[in-house]
Amino acid sequence: MDFEFLISLFGESGTNAIGGLLLGCMFGVFAQRSQFCLRAAVVEFARGTIGKKVAIWLLTFSAAVGGTQVLITLGELDITDSRMLASYGSLSGAIVGGLLFGAGMILARGCGSRLLVLAATGNLRALFSGLLFAAVAQASLKGVLAPVRDSIAGAWLLHNDGGLELISFLGWGSYTGIYLGVVCMIIAIFYGIKNKLTPWAWIGSVGVGAMVVGGWWFTYHLSYQTFDPTQVESMTFTGPSADTLMYLLTPDNVALDFDVGLVPGVFLGSFLAAFLSRELKLQGFQEGRSMIRYIVGASFMGMGGMLAGGCAVGAGLTGGSAFSITAWVALASMWAGAALTDAAVDREWTSRKEDVSLVGVKEQAALS
């Protein structure tokens, strides 16, 4: 596709930002309507159920993987120069960061993208957590936490001499990615039908995955139509959240790009979807003590996302669709960290609450 007209109107960086804004807006609509959420899927699976949340996540993941691999096979996409497949990857960062991020999204009740979607619908807990997430991410990238991140990330590096792309590394065929995407989609459709997903759940789930494919396609085709280097990338929210925060605070020091357009686009799309479906609702903290888990959770995600090279969407969907080795390791670590934290924190808390309620019922019966 020729972006020459848009570039002549808005410039190269402006066109890149507009692409991020539009794709982000559609992502926000689909994510809000489908209620796509990795945290909910992990909790559901860890508690022994493959229900609607797992089915939605599988649909999204298979759409992102299958669509991206089809474009690569057709020659419409080349992501070998993307950050996901750069000259080296950090396995230590992927493992530690993934575990931290997984634990954080349980404590904050949502990953980075989910917090952004919820904040747009009026959830002030999500807004608070999202801002803290962005601040800690920035501190981990260039601030006081950067030495800690560098130390952990540099402990176990995977160099590009054997390839950082999983399919090539294992010596599998060029169609393997498509086959895996199709198999995953069949499984997702089975559980989607079994759990009686709503039409919007089907459309929104596939739509979120399609926006990952769209991000890859847009930035790739823009990259060879610009004079200045344009990063080939797609949906992710750790770095972009930090960049957007810094752009709002110091606009002269941050360049317009895909990432800076993405975050406000998702917020706008989620708000419009919630407004049209009459789901806007102000929600806040019920007590000061509950803020502690959100503060810890958001902080874990900010550091974890930077270490892992992406969030639940960045590593899980975008990195997964590129078959980046470190992204797949990070995704597995996120599932593990989330499941362990749910077992240690939320299920224990729920069990105690049920025990207290049961004691109250027995006391009430004895009095009567």
Image (spheres, helix red, strand yellow):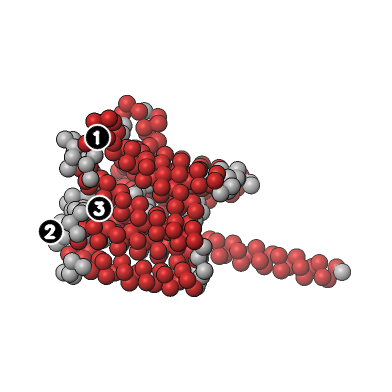
* Classed neighbour count for the residue bearing mark 3: other residues with Cα under 10 Å, few (<14), some (14–19), many (≥20): many
Task: Give residue 360's quadrant in the image.
Answer: bottom right
Give the spatial CA distance, label 3 vs label 2: 15 Å
Residue placed most toward the observer, 267 or 243: 267
Mark 1: give few (<14), some (14-19) or many (20+) Cα within 10 Å. few
Q: Amino acid at mark 3?
A: Met
The image quadrant that residue 264 belongs to is top left
Q: Quadrant of the C terminus?
A: bottom right
**Secondary structure type for disc 2:** loop
Q: Position of residue 101 (x, y in %)?
A: 40, 54
- SS at badge 3: helix
Q: Nearer the viewer, residue 323 or 65?
A: 65
Q: Is 41 on the left-hand or right-hand side of 73?
A: right
Residue 65 seen anywhere in this rendered image of the structure: yes
Q: Residue at x 19, y 37 (%)?
A: 226
Cα–Cα span, label 1 and label 2: 40 Å
Residue plotted at (55% across, 61% down): 346
Foreground label between 1 and 2: 1
Numbered circle sitting on residue 161:
2
Q: Which residue is mark 1?
A: 5
Q: Earlier in the sequence, mark 1 or mark 2?
A: 1
Report the residue at 71% width, 65% height from top. 357
**Disc assigned to residue 84:** 3
The answer to whether residue 41 is seen in the rendering is no
Q: What type is the residue that disc 2 sits on?
A: Asp
Q: Earlier in the sequence, mark 3 or mark 1?
A: 1
Please provide percent x and percent y for residue 35.
Answer: 49, 56
N-terminal-most mark, 3 or 2: 3
